[in-house]
């Protein structure tokens, strides 16, 4: 049976921020899922076409990526070692989601590398840091 070590204060701050980031991701997913026809109409022709071309499974992938991120944050707060594999799953899903977009669309050609890939790179980097934090917490015995 593993024994929990006392977690430092910064762990709680980081775990809270990871959870908050997960809430933001779920909110973004919900807003995308429930976007009104007027909001879609206000998008550029390219963005409307890109949105319409997403296969049905893409939204499942998107939802799984953000929900596993949020659940991983909650598991960190609960000091559960399950946070690490759940956050790793979120990272894999994020990579699959953006990988699909960049592999099958001309998004980068149309919007440029910074415009198309800037925020996805930040999202993926945050997911990597989340996995690293969970692994470190597990090594230190802060989550078991």
Image: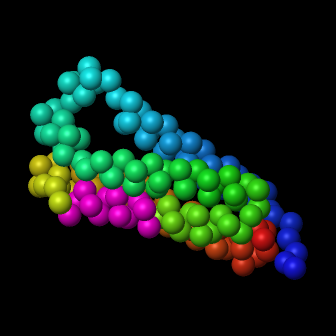
Q: Residue furthest top?
A: 38
- As drawn, 120 above or below 41: below
Q: Quadrant of residue 38?
A: top left
Q: How is the image coloured?
A: rainbow
Could you say where residue 9 lies in the image, as x and y percent from the top left?
79, 57
Which residue is depicted at the point 86% across and 66% down? 6
Residue 101 lies in magenta, yes or no?
yes
Residue 104 visible at all: yes
Left or right: residue 55 compared with residue 12: left
Which residue is depicted at the point 20% across and 63% down? 103
- The majority secondary structure of the magenta stretch comes to helix
Residue 17 visible at all: no
- Quadrant, the N terminus: bottom right
Could you say where residue 118 lies in the image, as x and y percent from the top left?
31, 54
Could you say where residue 18 lies in the image, as x and y percent from the top left?
60, 53
Left or right: residue 31 compared with residue 20: left
Which residue is depicted at the point 72% across and 74% down? 138
Which residue is depicted at the point 76% across and 68% down? 143
Could you say where residue 34 lies in the image, as x and y percent from the top left?
39, 30
- Magenta residues (range): 92-103
């Amino acid at each position: 049976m593993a024994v929990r070590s006392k977690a430092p204060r910064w762990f709680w701050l980081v775990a809270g921020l990871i959870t908050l980031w997960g809430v933001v991701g779920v909110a973004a997913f919900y807003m995308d899922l429930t976007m009104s026809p007027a909001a879609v109409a206000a998008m550029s022709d390219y963005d409307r076409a890109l949105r319409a071309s997403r296969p049905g499974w893409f939204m499942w992938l998107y939802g799984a990526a953000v929900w596993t991120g949020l659940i991983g944050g909650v598991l960190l707060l609960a000091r559960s070692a399950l946070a690490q594999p759940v956050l790793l799953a979120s990272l894999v899903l994020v990579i699959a989601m953006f990988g699909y977009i960049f592999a099958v669309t001309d998004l980068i050609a149309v919007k440029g590398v910074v415009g198309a890939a800037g925020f996805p790179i930040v999202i993926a980097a945050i997911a990597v840091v989340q996995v690293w934090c969970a692994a470190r917490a597990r090594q230190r015995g802060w989550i078991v």
